[in-house]
Amino acid sequence: MHNIWTITRREYNYYFSNPAAYLVAFMVLLILGILFYANITAAILQQYPASVQIIIGPLTTLLLFATPAITMRLLAEEQRSGTMELLLTTPIRDWELILGKWLGAFLFVLTIVLTSLIFPVFLNQMVEPGIDQGLLISGYLGVLLFSAALVAIGVAVSSLFSNQIAAFFSTLGVYLLLWLIGTPAQAMGGAGSKLLSYLDFGEHFYATFFQGIVDMSDVVYYLSVTALALFLGTISIEVRRWR
Amino acid sequence: MIQVEGLTKYYGQRVAIEDLNFSAHKGEILGFLGPNGAGKTTTMRILCGYMPPSMGTARVAGYDVVEQSLEVRRRIGYLPETVPLYQDMTVYGYLKYMADLRRLPNAEDRVDEVLELVHMVDRADGYVGNLSKGMRQRIGLAQALLHRPEVLILDEPTIGLDPAQIHEVRKMIQEIGRERTVLLSTHILSEAQQICNRVLIINNGRIVAEDSPENLQARLTGAQRVYLRVRGDSDGLEAIVAGTEGVVWVSKKSDAELEFETFPGKDPTPMVARAVVQAGYELMELKPVGMSLEDIFLRLTRDEPEHPQIGSPLDENTIQRV
């Protein structure tokens, strides 16, 4: 645990000493703010009650594009600069390294997500009789589980590369694949369609968390994806040793 | 401290090291000498637990590098060839991170200690990215010393340093080597000669020779190198010396000086003296000089060491006798 925490602390602090990471966080919150403003204006003009969905929906999509930028360097940079050799010859286990990296990046994403809570607070002031608390909690719980899985995939992909740009686009590619895998399912039908829509990343979010429903099967889905990705990341480090 | 048996590593089809056997004791500085690509770094990486060997075993402080990798890693300080540093960290922050990864008690105090050891206290708050090559090397060394390792593995510790820094780093290694085991790689022979108790010469993944620097030199100097000086002009002198039987090659040192090497077992020096005098030169000096480790190294790592016609490739002025 100590080892994991040492790495986590280093990674988390890194983001706060790095202008690029600030920029990513700032852009997410800025775009979220602009969309929030636009949606609120529309809601007022057309006189319908705005729900927290106008925050959680865009936040999910933004994280899909921002997370690769946060995770791309995690292991790729260590490999490029040769510090991997250092880490792999200190007495820490490969899975501790992966877990520490994941937790560091996840906490940074978590920081962005928690900062975005100012928008629901605003919204709560604006609408009568206040926002739907249940939807807020389920939605943010969904975002948390969703981003835990995104970060884990990012860590695993980063372990395959020594080039950050390659890691970025490959990570984004994996996300989009998982994000869109359910789409052909609608046309297919049958057991294959069931499988594809089960694998779909968005399906487990929009159908439940986003509607205010917390279903254990979705929690299990995101936790499984996270665990699987971290496991594959560890394997990838071990394979790297044997080459 | 270090025991290596039958160590072999393949990268795909390519053999990086083959059947290495050696050991190192406590308080010994073992030099790993060889040209680039000889397998030095591979061997060191295996010893540090960075990667497993394809065959054979290696034990460090009694622990197997594959089976008990973590125990080995706790006892080894490693300085890789390209000093791995985090550019965004301060010197202090970097060493503190390394100390935390190694779970050192009183990490702060220990970091201060090693900073003092490598004379970097005044740069503790500077960013690693702004350091000169020599300073980076010292920080790398500090990192390797943090946990007072029983075994220190240094891959080309003096590469890229200026002469003053080289001197300093060598002195430091010698101090450390008194109570620990040091394995260092180098392709500079004088370095091995100066700081090592024992030298392993490795080429194409095999150990070519293993001995003390003194013995290695003695062992190979059946062949002798002779220094010759004449007064005044020496035009044509090289050809005369090279033409004498028993001379392997001649190398011109300056206008009036040259050196030649003899076949092992034969000593053509008197014949050379006679030939030189008969040709009308005024012979001033003729004396045997010991072969440098450089020559020995070239001999040992040459593909056909018995072939006499190869001149010292280090020297452009070498005339080869055909």
Image (cartoon, grey):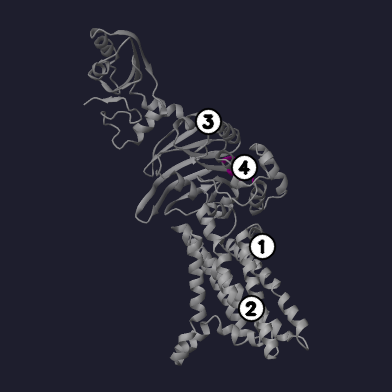
1 and 3 marks in contact (CB < 8 Å)? no
Of circles 2 and 4, the one toward us is 2
Residue B307: image x %, image y %?
26, 31
The verdict on a common chain for dots 1 and 3 is: no
Query: On the image, numbered disc 3 is attached to which residue?
Result: B163
Residue pointed to by mark 1:
A1
Report how far apart the C-alphas of labels 1 and 4 lie in the structure. Answer: 26 Å
Mark 1: few, some, or many residues within 10 Å (few <14, many ≥20)?
few
The percent coordinates of residue B240 (x first, y second) are: 24, 16
- Magenta-highlighted residues: B137-149
Using the image, tell me which numbered label, if any, was put on residue B142.
4
Three-letter amino acid code at the position of disc 1: Met
**Which-is-in-front pick, marks 1 and 4?**
4
**Can residue A215 be seen?**
no
Image coordinates for residue B96, horizontal then vertical, percent: 67, 50
Q: Nearer the viewer, residue A162 or A124?
A: A124
Asked which quadrant contains residue B309, the reply is top left
Res B77 → quadrant: top right
